[in-house]
Image (tube, rainbow, N blue to C red):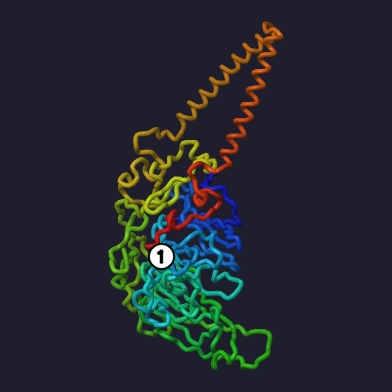
Amino acid sequence: GRTTCLPVALKQEGYELMETHDGTGAIVIVDFLIDNGFMDIPASSVYTAGPHHALFSLSLTDVYRADFGFSTDFARIEGLPGVYIANQMVARPVDDVDDYYDLSDSSGKPLVESRITFNGGGLWQRIPAPSYFNNPKCNRCSGSTTSCWLHLNGMSAWDSMSSTLPSVYSNPSAPGLIMATGNVAPTGLGLDDDLDGTCTWLSSDGGVSWSDVGEGAYIYEYADWGSTIIMARHPGNKGTVADEIRFSIDYGRCWVSIPLFTALVVDNIRIEPDGQRPRVVVHGKACRRSSNPNCSYLANDTRTSVQGIMYMVDVQQLMGTKMGQCASTDYEMFSIPTSRLDKTPACTLGKQMMIQRRGQDKLCFNGPDYKRPIPLNTTCNCTQADVECDYGFLRNGGKCSPLPKERMPHCPTLESGSYHVSKIGKRLVHADVCEGVQNIIPDTDGKGTRTDGGDDSGGGGRKHSALFGFFMFMLVSAVLLGIFFSWWRFLATESHKDSVRDVASLLVSLCVGAYYWVVEKIRGRPSGIQEHDLGYFQPLGEVPEQEAGIFTLK
């Protein structure tokens, strides 16, 4: 097996492992507690391994983990390699000053903000709120003079022991589609700061732009390889009852409502694992008419058992002859756009990836026999978007700063010489295939192989040289020891022996003193390191955002 190295000695509460999109690497999510002097705040840190799969670097810290949840708010966006969404905790601004500080210095509930990355965790950014709202109540930034951001519920909200809310959801059968519940908020507010502003959100371009598709919380599912979206009211934290089911056949632009004869409290929407057919099962339980007149129980019903209710929704049957089988001309090539305004295909992980999907305005079904072609990839030139901080480095604004070597743990991969860390502290993101890496990383190929003319033998020559040197040292030591033993046994007088004993005692005392001095230096704080700098290498310590630059806010 391969030895895995992380840049800190972890004091963890637990681990989570997540496969990368290509299935050849892993992301390590480490749970821990932040002690701010008043309470322990559960949190997680995310470590990515880069192209070597074994040398992990910090990608994002202080990731949100609810008190009564079982999961960390970190989601892999299926079908779009390199795209992830996470919720990060930051300390709330104080005295109306837009300035964030260390969570361990805060005394109140932390602010939870959503982040998205399009390059496998190399760089994280906030999610801008939409400029137009379909439902005015979803716009909680109206009248605000600060920037407005979108914050989405993660798995900790869905797995919560208290009230649940649907979380970020994607499916490889529906490339580009992401749905979630959440809220928009101006700078200084975050997720759940305004429960009345909870809405349901949809992105059809891989997370670049978003729109509100439902006021309140809905549960959702994709069908017919992503051509059809179906959703229903979810009880959320208000116990809302569903008396209709909505579906869209144009990626959320328009919605059709189907009234239900009997209302219900929806648990979930189910579809077969591969999402091939345009039909789903909506299941839940009966409700009382005090909530909705279409509920099956009277308001004063006292029964203890609750009746289950299930609906089969077949969109193809509902549409009748209006939608047939898709032809080859009904498909488009989708790619993540550069921005909300620039629809040019973006380079993600060093390539423009074009995925076939049904066109937004085409009224047809893919059908169960549809086979999506392999995506078409065009390689891009390497830019700073293709790199992350190498092992032993931490992002600090636009550069990667080295962690103090005094506290770096033992790493056999580096000591064997099989991997070389770049002098500028950067490497390619896992699965990145960009061309011209030498233009941004001058001394390695971005994967641990030196390109600056240095020794790239993988450490074999050094190991042989070290072994030979050790052998010669032992041989010379043995010869000298033999000479000393012969002198001591046959030639030395008692006066000589007493002198040797005195010198030996002095040397032992000096060696013991030197040993304890070294130990104290190792355990102590390196010179020039301030108190908050310990966050760089203490077990999952916190680093002030303005100094660590772990994520990009703008």
Helix, strand or loop at disc 1?
strand
| Residue 511 visible | yes
**Relative image position of residue 475 (x, y in whole percent):** 57, 18
Q: Mark 1: few, some, or many residues within 10 Å (few <14, many ≥20)?
A: many
Locate residue 235: give its quadrant. Answer: bottom right
Q: Quadrant of the N terminus?
A: top right
Considering depth in this image, is 62 or 252 the residue closer to the camera? Answer: 62
Considering depth in this image, is 54 or 85 the residue closer to the camera? Answer: 85
Which residue is outermost to the front?
95
Which residue is outermost to the top?
491
| Residue 225 visible | no
Considering depth in this image, is 251 or 447 the residue closer to the camera? Answer: 447
Reply above or below: 70 against 136.
above
Reply above or below: 62 against 286.
above
Which residue is outermost to the right?
494
- Residue, x 46% and y 33% (percent of image)? 459
Query: Is 245 on the left-hand or right-hand side of 349?
Result: right
**Relative image position of residue 51 (x, y in whole percent):** 43, 48
Check disc 1 and report the residue beneath it. Answer: 126
Considering depth in this image, is 371 or 210 the residue closer to the camera? Answer: 210
Look at label 1 and name its amino acid: Arg
Locate residue 371: give its quadrant. Answer: bottom left
Reply above or below: 330 against 242.
above
**Relative image position of residue 439 (x, y in whole percent):** 30, 46
- Residue, x 39% and y 72% (percent of image)? 148
Q: Quadrant of the C terminus?
A: bottom left
- Residue, x 38% and y 71% (percent of image)? 146
**Relative image position of residue 408 (x, y in whole percent):** 52, 43
Q: How many marks?
A: 1
